[in-house]
Image (tube, coloured by chain):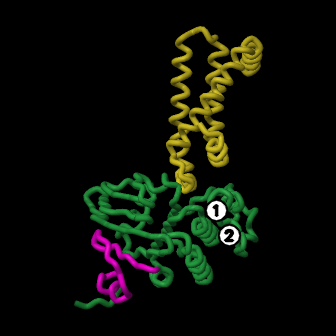
Chain colours: A yellow, B green
Amino acid sequence: MSIGLLTKSLTIYKPIFLWNVLVSLLTSVFFIINGFKEPGIYTFALFIKLIGWLFSIAIYFLFYQPTAYYFKNQGISFRKIMVNLVLYDLIVFIGILIVSSLCRDFLSTVLTNLLQTAKY
Amino acid sequence: MQGLSIDSVNQSFADREVLSSVYLNCKIGEVVGLLGRNGSGKSTLLKIIFGSTKANFKYLSINNKVYDKGYLSKNLSYLPQDNFIPNQITVLQAINIFCKKQQAELKQIDFVANHLNAKFYNFSGGERRLMECLLMIYSDAEYVLLDEPFSQLSPLWIEELKNHINRAKAYKGFIITDHFYKSILDVSDRIVLLHNRCNYNINNEDDLVMHGYLPGFTA
């Protein structure tokens, strides 16, 4: 895990990283609604994150393929960038989950109010 | 042997064999010109050296170290045919990334000095090509692969680029391929022709005619 590599890749792949943060936020909503004690929710979260990472690879191949040489000329392979991004995304995800568990009561009230406002 | 050398390159796409037992080497202080007809495998060979295309078989060594992918040596720069520097990067950022050692020389060039804070999307196709070429020529790597560096450039800039290659070759090795064969002949110390899946050493323009690269050969 390298912070230098993360900052380098963020200058180009910011949308991919933001996409993964969005997936993490959406996954944390499920934790806030269903609680942290059900074992099934962890498998579900892992599944959602896995799909998110697969979409990240798809986004890269659809929109960022020409940037491959920019990094290869610095001696950095695509695999190295993705592994680094995923590891930092995991840290962000765990951070979001910790904040969600600490503020679960507040967040669940806000979420319920938001959902009810949207309904009516 | 100090230098870049690739040996026994075999590459085929589907049933079509493009390269067969091809050998190429380059030392510091040398410019190797790579010529060949369309589809003869020039770009493929450069991509195989750099490591972005996997060959059926090859043996690549850079400064006595064997590598599977050339770019992993961090001592090899490659200018692809298409633009590769992202739009949102400024010239100064690109210089700081690729040319830490020779940035003073690069910043002396008028075109570079006048556009240090410009982003790459502000350039025209030719300007962008020139900037990317200069960045690779003055990059920190000892060996530079240039795939069609003269395309999209006006004659004036082609001459300027040739001067920069000649200046930088004192401490670098270049492998250059382009269809502007006269420019390649001018700038190169040695010419290699890819023809019939193999490589041939070329001594003069007559050899190019004899091997069917230039028109005029009658049996």
Q: Image height check: is A42 above or below B163? A: above
Q: Position of residue B78 (x, y in %)?
A: 51, 62
Q: State the quadrant of the C terminus of chain A.
A: top right
Judging from the image, mark 1 belongs to the subunit labelled: B
Q: Position of residue B43 (x, y in %)?
A: 42, 65
Q: Within the image, what quadrant is residue B49 found in? A: bottom left
Task: Check disc 1 and report its element: helix, strand or loop.
Answer: loop
The residue labelled by disc 1 is: B99
Q: Within the image, what quadrant is residue B136 found in? A: bottom right
Residue at image point 53% right, 13% down: A40
Report the amino acid beneath label 2: Leu
The residue labelled by disc 2 is: B106
Let me know if marks 1 and 2 both belong to one chain. yes
Residue at image point 31% right, 76% down: B200
Residue at image point 34% right, 78% down: B201
Q: In the rendered image, is residue B15 in sight?
A: yes
User: Disc 1 versus disc 2: distance between alpha carbons?
Assistant: 8 Å
Badge 2 local density, few (<14 within 10 Å), some, or many (20+)? many
Q: Which residues are magenta?
A: B189-213
Please tell me which residue lies in front, B44 or B101.
B101
Judging from the image, mark 2 belongs to the subunit labelled: B
Label 1 close to label 2 by CB (< 8 Å): yes
Instruction: Compare marks 1 and 2 and give the one earlier in the sequence.
Output: 1
Q: Position of residue A42 (x, y in %)?
A: 55, 17
Task: Check disc 2 and report its element: helix, strand or loop.
Answer: helix
Question: Is B3 inside the magenta-drawn segment?
Answer: no
